[in-house]
């Protein structure tokens, strides 16, 4: 059924170290964006639920804006435009390369908009009486959030947060547009160098599939255990 | 150094003299819309079939449908795009591969992007269709079977007419995602909106204007789609359900 294409997988074994480094970069970006996304996303979610109207509007505007534009556009903004702006605004020397750091920040800001929505739903799933009870015990609002509401909210959200983490891991492949050598970027480079793009794209797809499928099965398993508990 | 804003840049004739830069943007917008809408049609058709298959009481069929969904959901869109564009033409029977490569490059990019986005989105549509079918009260299926309808008839006349209506609101966000995901197709050189924006930066040295314009265009697409879907949701709302949910 296949055409006359002759597979030659020989460029992969020699490049495993390089590909492994790329995978590490992907995982590092993922970890960084998850942490930043959850922290910043929690603040956004709380701002969005705040009774201070301007704060709630600002958070809503932020979340809706980032959710309406493609990730590719956000990365290009932060890779091409923001560094130029920073250079002229902060008077950085033109040679200083802030582009990668900037793209990373853009990625984290983008993903936190999605986390904010999950966390907002999580906070709203906690019964109102919990907050009232915490206040009745004499806790201040920050104390009540930190010790009573958020721990319960996060417990409910864990499966969703993990699923989002898998999506985020897949999204990291798009840092390709910012020339960062993540896993897919590394695979593409090897394939391009050896004229073996077919094998390397298939290999990259297989690796992503195995990792994401295993992770999503684990999340499902965990979710079922949580429901039974 | 002070940045010189110049919104008039869009009215300047382009560097290669094929109209103004505004024409470039409009061409990009057209490609984005055409690509996303044709991919959406593929996604709806495939997604409906696969989603239904996931719910049928037949291990083989539902297994194939599950494998299909897992496959397209667990590989990043970018990798899938490169598969359709760079890999598949090499693996096809020689005649088909050569026929594809003989097309003009723009057609090649467009077809690969459309098929890729269509299949990618269809797996997500299938999940929504499946949960729509599963959300139906079990009695509906049993009632259909008890009336003497066969299983396909029960699907055709009892379950699907309800399920397809219930599934419209959750499909709105998938529809929005098609437009956003289409920006990924700029990576294979397809000159859609994001790619035109990037090209304008290189040609005009007015990066802010072109990026603001592209971003606003995406926001507008978003708003239009949401308003449109709200109308559609109103049309298909099932009386007696909370907000048609």
Image (cartoon, coloured by chain):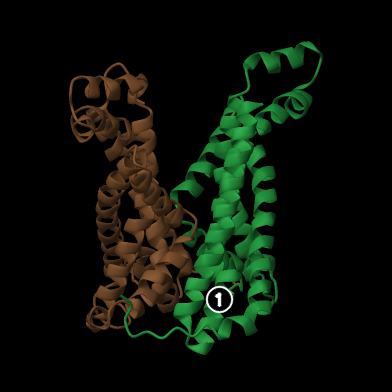
Q: Residue furthest bottom?
A: A194
Side of A153 relative to B196 (left or right): right
**Is residue A24 at least partly visible in the picture?**
yes
Of residue A40 and residue B111, the one placed in the foreground of this image is B111
Name the secondary structure under disc 1: helix
* Percent position of residue A54, x then y: 57, 32
To which chain does the residue with label 1 belong? A
Q: Residue at x 53, y 42 (%)?
A: A63
Q: Which chain is brown?
A: B
Of residue B175 and residue A79, the one placed in the foreground of this image is B175
**Is residue B231 at least partly visible in the picture?**
no
Q: Residue A125 appears in which quarter of the rendering?
A: top right
Q: Residue A169 appears in which quarter of the rendering?
A: bottom right
- The residue singled out by tag 1 in the image is A187
Of residue B50 and residue B236, the one placed in the foreground of this image is B50
Q: Residue furthest top?
A: A136
Q: How many marks?
A: 1
* Percent position of residue A104, x then y: 63, 62
Residue neighbourhood size for the residue with mark 1, other residues' Cα within 10 Å, grouped as few (<14), some (14–19), many (≥20): many
Side of A226 relative to B86 (left or right): right
* Percent position of residue A225, x then y: 64, 33
Color used for chain A? green
Quadrant of the image containing the N terminus of chain B: bottom right
Of residue B99 and residue A136, the one placed in the foreground of this image is B99
Seen in the picture, residue A118 relative to B69 is either above or below; the reply is above
* Percent position of residue B58, x then y: 34, 41
Quadrant of the image containing the C terminus of chain B: top left
Q: Residue at x 41, y 48 (%)?
A: B66
Seen in the picture, residue A114 relative to A70 is either above or below; the reply is above
């Amino acid at each position: 059924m296949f055409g006359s294409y002759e597979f030659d997988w020989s460029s992969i074994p020699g490049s495993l170290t390089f590909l492994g480094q790329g995978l590490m970069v992907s995982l590092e970006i993922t970890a960084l964006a998850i942490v930043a996304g959850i922290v910043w996303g929690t603040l956004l979610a709380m701002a969005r639920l705040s009774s201070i109207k301007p704060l709630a509007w600002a958070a809503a505007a932020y979340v809706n804006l980032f959710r309406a534009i493609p990730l590719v556009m956000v990365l290009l903004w932060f890779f091409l435009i923001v560094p130029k702006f920073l250079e002229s605004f902060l008077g950085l020397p033109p040679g200083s390369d802030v582009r990668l750091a900037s793209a990373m920040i853009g990625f984290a800001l983008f993903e936190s908009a999605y986390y904010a929505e999950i966390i907002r739903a999580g906070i709203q799933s906690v019964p109102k009486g919990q907050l009232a009870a915490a206040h009745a015990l004499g806790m201040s609002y920050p104390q009540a959030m930190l010790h009573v509401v958020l721990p319960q909210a996060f417990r409910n959200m864990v499966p969703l947060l993990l699923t989002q983490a898998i999506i985020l891991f897949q999204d990291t492949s798009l840092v390709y547009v910012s020339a960062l050598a993540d896993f897919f970027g590394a695979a593409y480079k090897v394939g391009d160098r050896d004229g073996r793009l077919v094998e390397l794209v298939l290999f990259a797809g297989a690796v992503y599939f195995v990792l994401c499928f295993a992770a999503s099965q684990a999340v499902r398993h965990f979710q079922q255990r949580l429901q039974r508990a | 150094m002070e940045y010189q804003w110049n919104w008039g840049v869009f009215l300047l004739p382009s560097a290669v003299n094929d109209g103004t830069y505004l024409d470039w943007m409009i061409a990009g917008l057209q490609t984005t819309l055409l690509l996303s809408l044709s991919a959406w049609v593929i996604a709806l058709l495939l997604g409906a079939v696969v989603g239904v298959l996931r719910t049928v009481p037949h291990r083989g069929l539902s297994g194939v449908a599950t494998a299909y969904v897992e496959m397209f959901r667990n590989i990043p869109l970018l990798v899938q795009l490169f598969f359709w564009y760079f890999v598949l033409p090499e693996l096809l029977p020689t005649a088909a591969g050569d026929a594809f490569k003989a097309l003009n490059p723009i057609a090649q990019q467009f077809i690969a992007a459309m098929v890729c986005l269509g299949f990618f989105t269809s797996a997500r549509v299938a999940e929504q269709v499946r949960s729509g079918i599963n959300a139906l009260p079990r009695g509906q299926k049993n009632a259909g079977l008890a009336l003497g309808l066969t299983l396909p008839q029960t699907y055709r006349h009892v379950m699907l007419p309800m399920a397809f209506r219930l599934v419209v609101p959750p499909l709105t966000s998938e529809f929005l995602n098609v437009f956003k995901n289409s920006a990924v197709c700029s990576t294979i050189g397809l000159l859609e909106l994001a790619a035109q924006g990037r090209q304008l930066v290189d040609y005009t040295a007015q990066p802010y204007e072109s990026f603001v314009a592209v971003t606003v265009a995406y926001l507008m697409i978003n708003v239009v789609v949401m308003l449109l879907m709200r109308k559609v949701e109103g049309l298909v709302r099932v009386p007696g359900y909370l907000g048609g949910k």
